[in-house]
Image (cartoon, grey):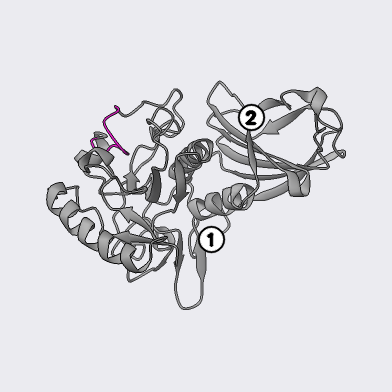
Amino acid sequence: MRTIGLGNENCEKGGQPARYEAYYRAFESTLHAAHPDLELVSSCANASAFAPPRPNLFDVHLYGDLPPDYFDHTPRTPGIGAFVSEYAAGHPHTSTWRARGERRPYGDQPKREANTQVGRRPYGDNSGGDHPGGGHSGGYPTGAYSWANALSEAAFALGLVRNSDFVRAAAYAPLLVHERAADWSPNAIVFNASHVAPSPSWFVQELLGAAFNGKGKQLLRSSATGGVVAVAAYEPARARLILAIVHNGSEASEVSVRVDGAASWWPPRGTAEVSTLWSANLSAVNTLAAPDIVVPRRSQVPATARAFVLHVAPYSLSVLTLDGVRREVR
């Protein structure tokens, strides 16, 4: 074990930061005496609640609005980062102190508004109750598990990847729930004795985890406009270019893909693999009766030149991988 968290939301919802810090310091001194390399995670999301020396990691929980640029302007301090251990767009009982953005990650900067509607959950209906077994279609609440919320989470997750110098790790809300034994919503996968229904949010985690998790991947400069959030990376071990795009438009679109500094790249092979998660219906959910309403679809696109066009579906997450992309060493 290399990392351990101490407490849970002890500085929020009426918590007492000073009292928590006293307990934290007691655990810190005892644990580090026996395990000096053990990394501790503070359950306070605000580093300013601690006197120096501050913890290395702060546990951040975010529900409701998830703007992709949430961490873009967070002050960087060497050795200090965030662990976003809970996030979801579709929490039916998002409380006002979270919705107002009072729960700020690490410090005193104001919460940034998203520069597009992606991540703002303007279409995220959180009605429908807490319990997947509560009588809704297939056992699901109609809003918390919707594609609208999953799309917002995808855009937010790309923001986490883009800020991975500060966001050291992230995890979605709970993983599994039985359809008739839910005390929390949303969850990534609903099941019963004979069926399982991964939510659209689960597939977002699956696609982006496969694309960006693991060591050795290098983030590349990328930019996008017009309701698009994009992140690009390069994996030297596989000579692989990775591009993830969240498109929030109601119409299909063409995205021009160009590798920055193309002269320093060897030409790739001729075909890129694309995984697309999309639905024109933002209220779409996967149910136990129909678990494949929103699932990834695989396709290939020609990519023989250093610049090519990717056709993206409306309201979609697309993950493109292109192998055989080698960089010259200069």
Q: Quickly name the residue at label 2.
A: 252
| Picture residue at 20% right of the left edge, 61% below the top | 26
The span shown in magenta is 102-109
Q: In which quarter of the image is residue 97?
A: top left
Which residue is at the front of the view, 237 or 13?
Answer: 237
Q: Which three-letter amino acid code belongs to the residue tagged 2?
A: Ala
| Picture residue at 53% right of the left edge, 40% below the top | 161
Q: Is mark 1 on a helix, strand or loop?
A: loop
Residue 74 located left or right of residue 229: left
Which residue is at the front of the view, 127 or 37?
Answer: 37
Instruction: Kindly report the secondary structure that dominates the magenta region of the rendered protein.
Output: loop
What count of labels does the image hold?
2
Magenta span contains residue 103: yes
- The picture places residue 160, in percent across and down from the top left corner, at 48, 40
Which residue is at the front of the view, 211 or 247?
Answer: 211
Q: Residue 290 carries which label?
A: 1
| Picture residue at 44% right of the left edge, 73% below the top | 192
Residue 319 located left or right of residue 112: right
Give the class, few, some or many, for how many residues have Cα within 10 Å of label 2's Cα (few <14, many ≥20): some
- Extreme-bottom residue of the structure: 193
**Do we see residue 275 in this rendering?**
yes
- The picture places residue 104, in percent across and down from the top left corner, at 28, 37
